Image: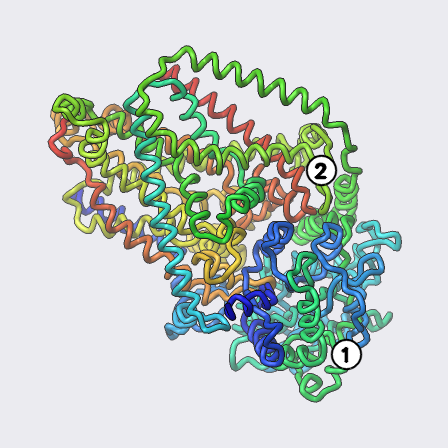
Amino acid sequence: MRRIAVHSILIAVSIGVLYPVLWVVKMAFTPSQTFAGASTSWNFHPTLANFHDVVSSHDLAGRWLFGRQLANSIVVAFAVTFVGLTLSTSAAYALSRFRFRGREASLRAFLISQMFPGVVTSIPLYVLLDRLGLLNHLAGLVLVYATTAVPFCVFMLKGYFDSLPRELEEAVLLDGGTHFDAFWRVALPLARPALAVTALFSFLTAWNEFILAYIFMSQPTAFTLPVAIQRYVGEYTTEWGHFAAAAILVSLPVMVLFFALQKHLVGGLTAGGIKG
Amino acid sequence: MIGTLLLAAQVVLWHSYREDEQRGLEAAVVQWNRGHPDQAVDPVAVPHDGFAYKIEAAIPHGQGPDVWIFAHERIADWSHAQLLMPLSGVDTQPFLPATVESLRQGGQLYGLPLAFKTLALYCRSDLVPKPPTTIDEIDPFCRAQRSAGRFCLAYEAASFYHHAPWLHGEGGTILDPTGRPHLATAPAVRSLRFVRKLVEQGWIPEETTGALVGELFNQGRAACTINGPWFRGEIQAGVAVTVLPLPKHLATGVRAAPLLTVEAGLVSAQAQRPEAALAFLVWLAGPEGARVRARIGHQPVAVSRLWEEPELASDPLLTPFRAQLDASVPMVSSPAMRATWEPAQQALRRVLRGAFEPEAALRDADRQIALALAPRPRSVSPIPYVWIGGAGALALLLWAVRRMRLSPRGPAIAYAYLAPSLLALLLLALVPFAVGAGISLFDYDGATWRFVGGAQFRQILANHDLGDPLNFYFTLAITLLWTFANVTLHVAIGVLLALLLRDPWLRLRGLYRVLLVVPWAVPNYITALIWKGMFHRQFGAINHLLAVLGIAPVSWFSHFWTAFTANLVTNVWLGFPFMMVVTLGALARLPRELEEAALLDGASRGQLVRRIILPFIAPQLVPAVVLGAVWTFNMFNVVFLVSSGEPDGATDILVSQAYRWAFTRGHRYGYAAAFAVLIFVVLWLQSRWVRRFQRETA
């Protein structure tokens, strides 16, 4: 009985949540480029024309733009996830396990860095990357995105490390292991759920960003997918069919990634035999 | 070696053309490159959104294009900021005079006209045997279409750009002969009354956006539309259309005159090979390039004699624009004109939604324009600021060092773990932040920076008129409300769903989880606009749903609370998956034994959640809430896309105001930076308050 109630709630919520997305799906499979909002008709012949157009975009020199842009997006998003998690797990571990001079100040710096609106920082960042020679390089984007994602990841992971018992790590140290062993072999594996959440967050930070990717990169072959998608929005009109198809293509990898990560978010298990 | 030589020889061209226009331009480039291999052009297609911003960032650092294509409105700014190379020795004889005149600045030519954009009347041939050619015919025409169950006209009635033709048709102007805006005039009142009648009679649709116009026209639910040459690509295959110039007054003979935009080819002041760039531009704008762009790109090109050639003269969708050109008013790009857009648009919307009489709305607009054109702050000497800033920094440093001394040094390994992320943070977040904050002490006029000290802060904070939605304190209150409402709902819905979704024995758990993160995964530009469409008064799904429940349709964007709700619903939809995922991560640690023990002890489900689960997930949830609040405070996308600040800017939040100052109200970056600093101060105070609250409750 309870199970039926839970399922009916979840089904109702899912339908409500997915309703707006159905319009995106409709636009993507309708060959025209008009917006679908006013017409309530679901009577149309679905075609893959929009997907075909989006995927097969080439530039004048015959380079396959979509392929390169997809590759850029994947490289950047995974690199940001890797760099972001490397930076934030180590920082969060230090902030959780050690008491040291400057700890409070660092925590505050992480929070403060999120408070300044991007409207005035993008030009200084541009100049900075130019000086560092990182303009027009994906590495520059990776660094900027990772820095944007790190504060949340640090807070999330620090909270998680705080709640893990220290006894196991202390046992490692007693057995002659180093601090790094305690961190790498014990704390990290136990923090899997938090790592899954922060990985998804870092990935998405990079995956959907438009304006910095646009300003920092000057070659269509170096653009990421959000920039490519925004190309369908013109000064006067928008190619809604192409835009919707591209939006769906862009969201699929995110869903696949989340599906893969969500098995680490298992509730109610006593992870690794640790009792809370 | 040869490769690098070729690359060096290239002229880089940036443009934001799409579809036909892009094909036309690229065909022209291919033709040029075949004849000029040593001056080959590399066309780079970029998004239109943010194009101007990218240009302004790139050119001063030598990263920009050699040639780019943009509407003429920015020429005044860009020539002033010395981004443009003045063109000398170019023969302007081949071009339509009206198109060349817009490209001059102080007698100097700064670009070549490629094409012009203006508005004309499109009608469906199947529904309209005889389109109206005079304004007097519109009444009977609309009545007839109405009785056939159609809108006679669908156009963006609430956009001032689309309203301008009616104003000019009544004999009015936006700027007086001295260049000052004057909106409260008899012709302007007449034009507003005219459009109000169209809406009141139900002849034209309400709350029209460009997307809705195309949809209604293609479905045959609207007989005609007022649109530009770009609309050609929107028309569905099989729909036959007639295009003709806008109607005129029978009595006076004055034609409704739209604004004229000239698409200009511009040469960068930093061009690597200015001669090659100019040679290409002259060719592209000239007869040969124009012919290709007209034939393939269907552009209304600026070369006058091409309009006599049969290919162009026989295109029934293009020639009406040539006729309309003679009855159009070139768009002025002075600061006065830029200050006019927003108030004029507001007046138009107020009248259309029936909140104001035309006279009152226009008088109020004039008052707002005068405020916006108030003299800029005076330059002041930076020396006292340097002293105060230096002393403040020193005091802060001493204080920090003293506080640091109080705590024990701690192990070196802690610093090793922390250093990389702090270094990145310092360089890529705090340094740009400091520079951005410094900008707030300067006034930017589109070209030069002037030190004005704290004058911009005083200007923002001195406006105490709480009835004015642009007032800082009003917007601050809205922003706080916006943040609080969003975060509360994000957390409530996210936690609730996570609790439902964590049960390991729940079937299809993985599927539900993935379905519920979809709003986070799909780019929000498109979903926010779909939500906006769902809140449309006449056609939106929400009002359809309300109608089923027997509730009268709501004009969501005409009232503050309903517009705020529309924004809120959209942002809650976008934001709850994040909180859900965070909660799922936190719940993963919760040992089942703890819950079972509590339930065995006779705890109710409510008690279990309040006493056991919430305290347990707090360490992860609190940082997510604090950061979520900061992000929501600065989340301008939804406000921009859904309500666009309607009504009258009342639903704008602080950061969307900052964006408007930086981009739509005349590129006042310094003023926007002052807003950003104030946003930072508010958030910082808020976080201190949260910490105190946490400490007291802990």
Tag 2, which secondary structure?
Answer: strand
Q: Is residue A32 above or below residue B461?
A: below
Q: Give the chain of mark 2.
A: B
Type of residue at label 2? Asp
State how far apart marks 2 and 1 are (Cα): 42 Å
Q: Residue at x 40, y 63 (%)?
A: A68
- Using the rendered image of the protein, determine whether residue B164 is visible from the camera's viewpoint: yes
Q: Looking at this rendering, what residue extends furthest in the bottom direction? A: B310
Q: Report the side of B659 relative to B418 (left or right).
A: right
Q: Give the chain of mark 1.
A: B
Q: Residue at x 47, y 32 (%)?
A: B426
Q: Is residue B564 above or below residue A91?
A: below
Location of residue B676 by image quarter: top right
User: Which of the two discs, 2 and 1, labels the residue nearer the N terminus?
Assistant: 1
Type of residue at label 1? Ser
Residue A19, x across and y down, in percent:
37, 56
Q: Is residue B231 above or below residue B193?
A: below
Residue B684, x across and y down, in percent:
51, 26
Q: Nearer the viewer, residue B273 or A173?
A: B273
Q: Nearer the viewer, residue B128 or B79?
A: B79
Residue B318, x across and y down, in percent:
67, 78
Residue assigned mark 2: B443
Q: Residue at x 29, y 36 (%)?
A: B583
Q: Residue at x 30, y 50 (%)?
A: A12
Residue A15, x across and y down, in percent:
32, 53
> How dense is the environment of label 2, judged by Cα within 10 Å: few (below 14), some, or many (20 and up)?
many
Q: Is residue A213 above or below residue B319?
A: above
Q: Nearer the viewer, residue B462 or B69?
A: B69
Q: Looking at this rendering, what residue extends furthest in the right direction? A: B177
Q: Report the side of B56 relative to B259 (left or right).
A: left
Tag 1, which secondary structure?
Answer: helix
Residue assigned mark 1: B304
